[in-house]
Image (cartoon, helix red, strand yellow):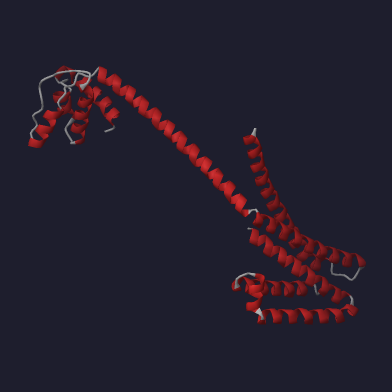
């Protein structure tokens, strides 16, 4: 309830600002029109023209008073308007940040679930240490032994990611790391594609 | 924008006031005597305001540049307001 009242007060202040601006603009246009047109329209010495001239001048002065009053009121409320604008900006930034965070969380969750699905169906080797050694030696020898376990799957993904990032060819990864050469090469290619999507390469 | 409104308001008040005096002097010849001495008084006030500019700035609590702008703006408003209604 308090929030609703606060919002309505804020809206009232902003509506009041718009109204003051509108009044000031109208007063400016009316004053300018009356001040500049009357001397060129009511030029005769008749009572009607004299009345029009005096009326236009009095209205011009009144319009000037209204403009001054609106300007002073807006000037006085300027800090309040600035604070409200800043609050609105902050709310907007917070909303954008929240939606971005939620989006990122959703992407991370979906990536993790996909990764887990892949890991369960991945016949890759745990060869981190061997890869490191072989890369240090600069050789292309990678392990041929296959030992699949649940704990080593994460490491296997890391190995593949490293191999991709170091510029190893797809066929090399499919044959040596995924062990899906020959007939299974097409299947390996599809799997590598999915892995690349997951690891972000 | 607020400053613009205030400046426009000041202009219309000054121009309207000067126009009232100017048109009255134009339409009623007997009012010219009073209008002349009013003009002399206003001009004297302007001269005094221009001479005592520094004191006036301190008294009003505004910057010298703003004071000069107000003085020139009000002078032009009076002149324009008086001239345009002299017909």
Q: Residue B23, how many percent across, how many down? A: 83, 73
Q: Residue at x 65, y 61 (%)?
A: B4
**Quadrant of the rendered image containing residue A123:** top left
Identify the residue at horizontal 46%, vertical 35% (top origin): A98
* Vertical placement of residue A140 versus B58, above or below: above
Q: Residue at x 21, y 26 (%)?
A: A155
Q: Is residue B87 visible?
A: no
Q: What is the quadrant of the C terminus of chain A in the image?
A: top left
> How many tags in the picture?
0
**A153 relative position to A97: left or right:** left
Residue A144 visible? The answer is yes
Q: Is residue A126 above or below residue B83?
A: above
Q: Residue at x 13, y 25 (%)?
A: A176
**Image location (x, y in percent) of residue A113:** 33, 22
**Left or right for B58, reference A150:** right
Left/right of residue A54 with respect to residue A107 in the rendered view:
right
The image quarter containing residue A124 is: top left
Q: Quadrant of residue A112?
A: top left
Residue B32 placement (x, y as % from top left): 86, 80
């Amino acid at each position: 309830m308090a929030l609703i009242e606060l919002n309505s007060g804020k809206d009232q202040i902003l509506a009041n600002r718009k109204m003051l601006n509108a009044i000031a603009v109208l007063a400016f246009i009316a004053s300018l029109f009356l001040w500049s047109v009357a001397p060129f329209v009511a030029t005769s010495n008749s009572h009607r023209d004299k009345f029009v001239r005096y009326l236009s001048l009095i209205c011009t002065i009144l319009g000037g008073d209204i403009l001054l009053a609106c300007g002073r009121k807006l000037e006085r409320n300027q800090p309040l308007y600035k604070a409200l604008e800043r609050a609105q900006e902050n709310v907007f930034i917070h909303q954008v940040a929240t939606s971005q965070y939620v989006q990122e969380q959703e992407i991370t969750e979906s990536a993790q679930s996909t990764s887990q699905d892949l890991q369960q169906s991945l016949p890759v080797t745990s060869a981190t240490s061997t890869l490191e050694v072989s890369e240090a030696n600069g050789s292309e020898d990678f392990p041929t032994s296959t030992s699949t376990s649940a704990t080593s799957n994460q490491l296997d993904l890391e190995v593949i990611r490293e191999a991709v990032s170091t510029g190893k060819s797809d066929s090399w990864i499919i044959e040596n790391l995924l062990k899906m050469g020959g007939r299974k090469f097409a299947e390996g290619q599809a799997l590598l594609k999915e892995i690349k999507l997951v690891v972000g390469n | 924008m607020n400053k613009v409104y205030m400046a426009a308001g000041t202009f219309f008040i000054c121009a309207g006031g000067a126009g009232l005096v100017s048109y009255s002097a134009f339409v009623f010849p007997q009012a010219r005597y009073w209008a002349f001495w009013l003009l002399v008084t206003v001009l004297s006030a302007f001269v005094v305001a221009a001479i005592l500019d520094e004191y006036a700035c301190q008294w009003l609590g505004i910057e010298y540049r703003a004071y000069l702008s107000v003085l020139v703006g009000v002078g032009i408003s009076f002149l324009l307001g008086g001239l345009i209604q002299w017909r």
